[in-house]
Image (cartoon, rainbow, N blue to C red):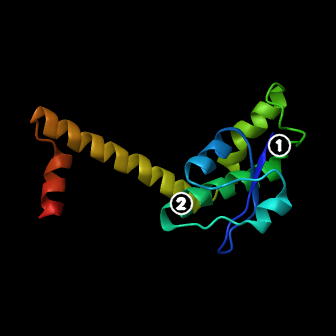
Amino acid sequence: MATWFAFKDGYDTIQLAGAQEKEAVILGFHGYATRAEAEAKRNSVNAFQAITLKMLEADYKTALKTDSQPGGKNSDLYKPQSIWNVATGDAFNINATQWFIRIGEVALGIVLIAIGLAKLTGVHNPISQVAKVVAK
């Protein structure tokens, strides 16, 4: 079972299922059983939601390319070929900008963890020293 989501401000109409469908609902989007229903009652998108919506749109486009969207020939995860298509679909079809964003998110996470550990333990490390200089 999949749900259709439509959005205002030039975003695509997408069909989501599983974890992505739940993520869209958690973000506050309302989905519908048919595409026509969704397009008749489009969701508004705020700046916070727009970031995640771009990723959901990219996932949907990848699912269409690999035919792994709900009802597609590769949507059955019990088939080995389907698992391969789903597992590699995003990795080989995302652009350089998305790669840099993901790498930046991981790097920022590591920096924040290092700063937090330094504050908790009282140990001074190079990252916390740089953070103190930047904060001034």
Residue 101 lies, with reference to residue 72, above or below; the image says: below
Q: Nearer the viewer, residue 131 or 126?
A: 131
> Which residue is depicted at the point 78% across and 66% down?
39
> Which residue is depicted at the point 79% across and 29% down?
77
Q: Tell me the quarter of the image containing the C terminus.
A: bottom left
Where residue 48 appears, x then y in whole percent?
A: 48, 62
Where residue 16 appears, x then y in whole percent?
A: 73, 48
Whole-angstrom CA distance, mark 2 to mark 1, is 23 Å
Residue 18 lies, with reference to residue 134, above or below; the image says: above
Image quadrant where residue 41 sits: bottom right
Q: Residue furthest bottom?
A: 9
> Which residue is depicted at the point 61% across and 60% down?
54
Q: Which mark is residue 70?
A: 1
Where residue 106 appears, x then y in whole percent?
A: 42, 46
Instruction: Report the residue marked by disc 2.
Output: 49
- The amino acid beneath tag 1 is Pro
